[in-house]
Amino acid sequence: MVTEKRQKSLVIVQLAGGNDALNTIIPYGDGLYYDWRKDVRIEQDKVLPINDYLGFNPALGSIKSLYDQNQVAIINGVGYPDPNRSHFRSIDIWHTGESKGIGESGWLGRAMRELDPKAENPIIGVNFGKGLPRALSLRGVPVASVSDLENYGLLPDIKVEQSRDLALSAFSQIYGSAMAHDAVSQFIGQTGMDALKGADILRTAPEQYSSSIEYADNPISQSMKNIAQVLTADIGTRVFYTTYGSFDTHAAELDTHTRLWTDTSNAISDFMADMKEHNLQDDVLVLVWSEFGRRIKDNSAGTDHGSGGVAFAIGGDVQGGLYGDYPSLKESDQLEGDLHFNNDFRGIYATIAERWLGVDPDTVSNGRFEQQDFLEHISNN
């Protein structure tokens, strides 16, 4: 079991597709919710109450248990001015922190550069999933992207050690020689060398991992298990990323939303139990977000793209509770049939940057935004 106090780590869980905030944290004490949601709604006797007005969707029972332990901050009405209801554009805004133009770098890429300005750590950031989220992107910042940690690494099918060493040596020479040429070749060469180093470091994590937690056999649970394997190995990764969904519930929402949130809630709960078992619960922060919410009025089978979402900050060092007023459901207070935002998501980034990672909040959040009090600890990175 880990007993030494460690550097703070950040885990991002992106709910792809636009999670229905209104059916996640439910204003069950407001009759307008049931007036607007004729079909796609959670009945009062099913809601897990937070207070007389708000409650959790029953599919979030495991997160509700963490909330009852003061480990979950619910940030209501999350969004940004002039919301965009396109998946691609809104995701890019969240990833870069730039809502007016096209951002050149990701907010986590900027955070990692602050943490490791000389780019000495090839695995400071790891994405578990396909591709590389824009949030992690910044030229010169090495990030690994892993689909399956158990089989990750360069040339994993080469079993004979001597043959593998020869192949890796050839790989190293190819990319090493590129370092001596023009700037583009040097960039490609450095990227290749970082991949080589990162792969050999990450592939050691599973064999170091021991836990009594049994994760479910679904993508989000397995991603959280992979994150736990790398995190407990203490090999230098500070930022972890994974994506789950699609939460784009235009139809069949009640079944789909329930299944996705059951998977996500249980996966996060198992992960936090794993962190507690390794005495790391106070050194890990999980941020759960989605690119936008859904329309207030249902379409009888589902809900369409909207605004005014909800985010969760989860961890042993989190100041749990409700943050931000829940957006009004009154027709006069709506934004073209949507929930109004009252918490700029970049304020969450600024809070995490300064109070958790110990880096410049304005650089990370791409401007100056009001911080929130779900974190009190000022970290030394």
Image (cartoon, rainbow, N blue to C red):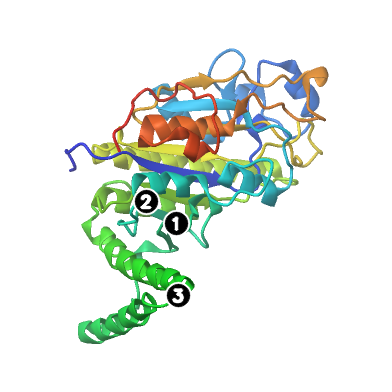
Considering the image in quadrants, where does the N terminus appear?
A: top left
Q: Is residue 126 left or right of residue 76?
A: left
The three-letter code of the residue at mark 2 reads Ile
> In the image, what residue occupies the spot 19% across and 42% down?
2
Q: CA distance from mark 3 to mark 1?
A: 32 Å
Residue 249 visible to an observer of this rendering: yes
Marks 2, 3: nearer the viewer: 3
Q: Which mark is residue 182?
A: 3
Residue 21 placement (x, y as % from top left): 64, 33
Between 103 and 154, the one nearer to me in the picture: 103
Q: Where 119 falls versus 152 (above or below)?
A: above
Q: Circle 1 is placed at which residue position? A: 128
Contact, CB < 8 Å: mark 1 with mark 2?
yes
Q: CA distance from mark 2 to mark 3?
A: 36 Å
Residue 216 placement (x, y as % from top left): 42, 51
Q: Residues within 10 Å of mark 3 (few under 14, many from 20)?
A: few
Residue 357 placement (x, y as % from top left): 37, 37
> In the image, what residue occupies the spot 61% across and 48% down?
103
